[in-house]
Image: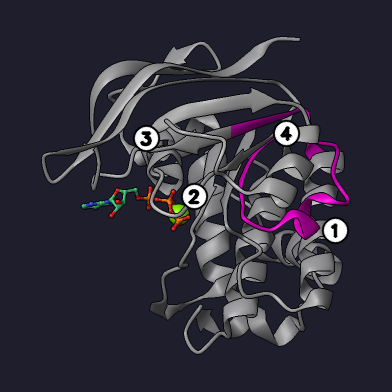
């Protein structure tokens, strides 16, 4: 199986404070990886650094994606390579509808124009999977969306943009039991439709039940503290993080 993402010795700082102290992570094409770890361990920082968020400085190591060294690349270039990050707290964009935002993101990432009619068809099919009412397409992106609706809008992006790697940062937090199932079905549909890879950052194992997890990584104090298969998820659910230090 070929390597999609290879992170080596990654050091990341924000405001002159080092948060990640040398992290290694490899994800092959089509694999599903889970990242767990205590609050403040550096999980979101890792996701943001892979996406190239300007908030974080990469001070050491490298990120190679699909045979491109992207360590120094801007987020829009990384998106074009096929990396997608869903945010722990999705942002609101007044004045732009969900539908027009997604259509322009689609055109930017693929470099292709898509007819409105054709786009609406794609969007409609994805909205059905997520049980999102079609009226949301014409609402301003995330403005006045409930927490759960924002999370569904993130998964909607995933289904429409079809990235090679989807990083989901606590896509399940604040979802009711039914919404967890719907979002989980959306993630599964992404996987089945595209064969893409997933990096799921979560505290909640419910979202993982419908998925086959290939590898679990535990991050503590900005370092990898343990790695294993899906069994590590149950181990954490039972014993917490007390056995892991960075
Ligand atoms: N932009 C920033 N400026 C300063 N400090 C930051 C910044 N981003 C993160 N940090 C700090 O880095 C540490 C790791 O934060 P991060 O958000 O990556 O944790 P996390 O593992 O995602 O935690 P949680 O489970 O609570 O989401 C925290 O101590 C946080 O305060
Ligand atoms: Mg976080």
Q: Is residue 1 visible?
A: yes
The x, y position of residue 245, in whole percent, is: 45, 33
Q: Position of residue 29 (x, y in %)?
A: 71, 21
Q: Is 152 positioned to the left or the right of 113 in the image?
A: right
Q: Earlier in the sequence, mark 3 or mark 2?
A: 2
Task: Give the numbered dot on residue 212.
Answer: none
For label 1, the crowd category at 10 Å Cα-Cα, with few meaning under 14, some 14 to 19 and many 20 or more, is some
- Ligand 1 near label 2 (Cβ, under 8 Å)? yes
- Image vertical order of residue 83 relative to residue 90, above or below: above
- Horizontally, residue 16 falls left or right of residue 42, namely left
Ligand 1 within 8 Å of the CB at mark 3 = yes
Of circles 1 and 2, which is in front?
2
Residue 209 part of the magenta-drawn span: yes
Q: Label 3 crowding class (10 Å Cα cut-off): few <14, some 14-19, many 20+?
A: many
Would you name the residue on which mark 2 appears? 38
Q: Which residue is mark 1?
A: 185
Q: Circle 2: is it few (<14), some (14-19), or many (20+) Cα within 10 Å?
A: some
Which residue occupies 58% across, 85% down?
146
């Amino acid at each position: 199986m070929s390597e999609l993402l290879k992170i080596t010795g990654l050091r990341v700082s924000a405001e002159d404070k080092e948060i990640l102290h040398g992290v290694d992570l490899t994800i092959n094409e089509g694999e599903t990886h889970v990242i767990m770890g205590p609050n403040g361990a550096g999980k979101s920082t890792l996701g943001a650094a892979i996406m190239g968020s300007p908030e974080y400085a990469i001070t050491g190591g490298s990120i190679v994606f699909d045979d491109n060294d992207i360590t120094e690349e801007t987020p829009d270039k990384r998106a074009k390579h096929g990396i997608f990050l869903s945010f722990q707290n999705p942002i609101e964009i007044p004045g732009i509808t969900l539908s027009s935002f997604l259509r322009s993101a689609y055109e930017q990432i693929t470099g292709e124009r898509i007819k409105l009619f054709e786009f609406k068809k794609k969007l409609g099919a994805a909205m059905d999977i997520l049980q999102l009412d079609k009226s949301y397409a014409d609402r301003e992106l995330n403005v006045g969306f409930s927490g759960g609706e924002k999370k569904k809008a993130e998964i909607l992006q995933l289904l429409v943009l079809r990235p090679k790697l989807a990083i989901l940062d606590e896509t399940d937090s604040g979802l009711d039991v039914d919404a967890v199932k719907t979002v989980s079905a959306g993630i599964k549909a992404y996987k089945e439709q595209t064969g893409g890879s997933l990096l799921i950052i979560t505290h909640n194992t419910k979202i993982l039940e419908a998925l086959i997890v290939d590898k679990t990584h535990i991050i503590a104090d900005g370092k990898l503290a343990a790695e294993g298969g899906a069994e590590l998820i149950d181990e954490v659910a039972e014993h917490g993080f007390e056995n892991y230090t960075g």
